[in-house]
Amino acid sequence: MRRFTQGFYGYAFAMMVCLAGVGVFLLVTPQSRTEHIPKVDYSIDVANMRRDAPYQVWSPASVLANWVPTSSRMTKGKDSEGKTTVTWRLGFATAKRAHALIAQSDERPAAGFANRMANSDRPQGSLQVDGVIWEKRFREDKNQRSLVRVLPDVTLVVTGTAQWDELSALAATLKQQTKLT
């Protein structure tokens, strides 16, 4: 009995007991093999934006098939001119499990907001989505594609690691919402 409590044999025996315990633990612990993506309900943020934003808000008319809304965040801040701004970011896991984000703000200058959201200030052509022209931007080192649309009262940016077809599909779902009073 003494040889299992001292020296190399004691160490080896203790290690085998520990490994056997870990093995039993792994066998009896339930393991989920299904993907879990946290889903958010962004309808409250849409209502708050429609009430608080000084511009008409753009939101998806519907969630695309197999897409999951994963984040929604409304913030108020100050732009470079000291004016209060309202920004909303809505993130999705796409059907191909890439990331896509809609960002909109009345921040001025509009180019500053667009450049920050797109991580690029260099247009690379344009793309027509449902008859509307969007400016294309691509940042290779981040694998980030962006569609930018500057309107008189709001700047829209659809961006992420999703491919152009998925970003275009998301941009096509955007509909202007009426202002709540």
Image: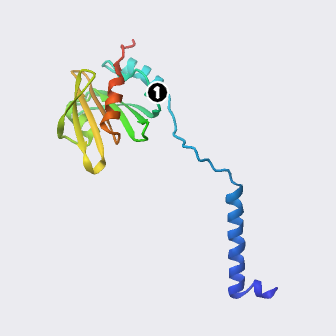
Across and down, in percent, residue 89 comes to 37, 32
Q: Can residue 120 be seen in this view?
A: yes
Quadrant of the snapshot with the C terminus: top left
Judge by depth and name the residue closer to the eye, 141 or 154: 141
Q: Residue furthest right?
A: 1
Identity of the residue drawn at 22% across and 35% down: 136
Q: Name the residue under label 1.
A: 42
**Residue shown at 68% from the left, 64% from the top:** 23
Q: Does residue 22 appear left or right of residue 162 in this picture? A: right
The image shows residue 94 at horizontal and vertical percentages of: 42, 36
- Quarter occupied by the N terminus: bottom right
Residue 145 position, x and y percent, is 28, 40
In the displayed structure, 127 sits above or below 175; it is below
| Kind of residue at badge 1 | Tyr
In the picture, residue 144 is in which quadrant?
top left
Q: For the point 72% across and 62% down, which residue is it?
A: 24
Q: In which quarter of the image is residue 111?
A: top left
Instruction: Look at the numbered disc 1 and give the secondary structure of its residue.
Output: loop
